[in-house]
Structures are given as C-alpha cells and as structure tokens.
Amino acid sequence: MKIAVFTKSTLKGHPARKALLDVLSKEGGFVIEEVGSDRKLPNDSERLLAFGGDGTMLDAAVLSAKAGIPVLGVNLGDLGFLTQFDAHVSAEELARALRSAAVKRRMLIECSVEKGSFLALNDIVVKSASTRPVSMELYVDGQFSDAYRSDGVIVATPTGSTAYSLSAGGPVLAPELNALVVNAVCPHTLHSRPLVVGSDAEITLRLIRGGEAELVVDGRSEGRLSPDPVVTVKKGSISALFADAGKNDFYERLLDKMNRWGSARSAEVTGL
C-alpha cells in the first residue's frame, strides 16, 4: 500500500514520527512517499498520513478530499482534536488503521468570493481587518436573516463547531450532523445569537457601511476583501475522508481535550 506522508515542517525530525515510519516501511510493507513543498500528493497514493496538530489536519483533510483518499492523523502538536492517534500509538495499531477499508465522511464547506473559491473543514470567517467592528448583513437562501455590527462572522461546520465558533459562544454540534453554524464574533447588540441552519442552505454575507474586511479560511488568512464584498458559503461538493481508526469517542475526546487547559491551569494555581 502506498502512503503519502504530510508533516508540519517543524516536526519532520520528531523521534516518534521517524520511529513509526521506519517500522511501517521496513516491517509493515508500506511504500512511503513524502508530500513535497508543492503540496501535491504522489500518484497512486491510497492513504494520506498526517503528522502534526489540528492545523496540519485541516490542511491534510482538504488535500486528501481533493485526491479522493482517506486521511489519518498522528498528533505531535498541542490539542490534537482532529487526529485519530497520539504520538505514543504503536506502529501495529497505526498499520491496522491505514489498511482499514472503512471511511468516515465529514462535511467541507466552500466559500466563493470575487478572488476565487476556497474549501474548509472547520470554518470560514469574515472579520474586521482593523480594530474597528464591521457591519454585515446575513442572508440564508436569499432571505434576509440578520444584521451584525461585530468583529466578524463565523460560518462553521459541525467539525468546526468545537473550534473558533465554540470560543465565540457557539454550540457544539456532533460531527455527523448535517448542519452549519453562523456565529457573530463579539456583536455590538443584545439580540444576536448563534444560528444553526441546514447543511443545504446557502449563506451570504454582505459587508455594508464601508469598512475593511479580511477572509480567513480554516485559520489561514486569504487576504483583504474588496470594498462591499459578497461572500457565499455552502456545503462543498466533496467530503473530507477520514480513515476509520475503530474509535467512536467524540464526547470523551471533547471532555478530555476541551477541559484539559482549564484543569491544567487550575492545578497550577492551587499547587495540585
């Protein structure tokens, strides 16, 4: 089986990565090829194996979706909410997951603006490019739904509901739900609340009253938008494909990963 390996640049020398790849190549019967700086997957790759944290997995999920192959992640970063394994995984367990034919699909969203289109696993954010809030109108399937004066607006997938949107007060959606979250960031109003819509809805954001806005796709800035931009977000035509590691521990991981930071800080303060 031919495996493409995608690694965060600063982690290529990580000892756990080297040890796992050595065993997979020498004893597991896998053909290993690294994804180069051009981010193109080698021909005939059957799986994409990603080493890094959640940022790496966001990039890897879109790359693998475009190639039509499943991705599997090993966390060498901090949070690792999207990865299937941590750095201490055995090569044998990793090999079993790579060989598994089972695949879990997760929704991608596609954003269309004047400068082009972008795919995201987590979220699309239209945010202020300065310290001043921006004013935006929200349309769902062409129907006016709300207006915001805020630091920005997030459109998140169920996968992305545990990321920036959660920090901005949005709800957690189970990853298998067919829905999207629209969530204003620090709205200057008492009425605005996160909105959950069906996954087939087309969401349009229009910047009004001037102001400078920036487009952010899965945490990566795609630059400033033109004056009076129209940003359209909808469910992508392709899905992210995750190799099934035989685990269904979303709620356990949610409690563990999301509570870890506060718990660690509390222990530090109390001396426990």
Image (tube, rainbow, N blue to C red):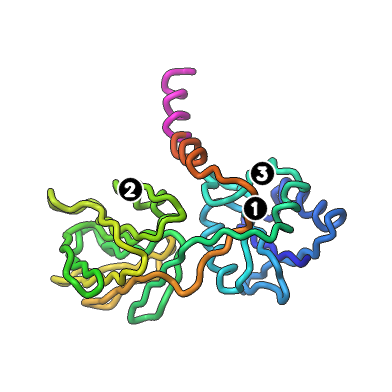
Query: Tag on residue 170?
Result: none
Highlighted range, magenta: 260-272
Which numbered tag is attached to residue 171? 2
Tell me which label, 1 or 2, sits earlier in the chain.
1
Nearer to me, 102 or 207: 102
> Element under label 2?
loop
173 inside magenta stretch: no
Which residue is at the front of the view, 115 or 160?
A: 160
Mark 3 Cα-neighbour bin, 10 Å: few <14, some 14–19, many ≥20: some
User: What residue is shown with label 3?
Assistant: 87
Helix, strand or loop at mark 1: helix
Most common secondary structure along the magenta stretch: helix
Q: State whether residue 37 is above or below residue 17.
A: below
Which residue shows up at 62% across the image and 64% down it?
Answer: 70
> Where does the image place residue 270, in percent across and percent down from the top left?
42, 18
Name the residue: 25% across, 73% down. Answer: 141
Given this view, does label 3 or label 1 mark the residue nearer the observer? Answer: 3
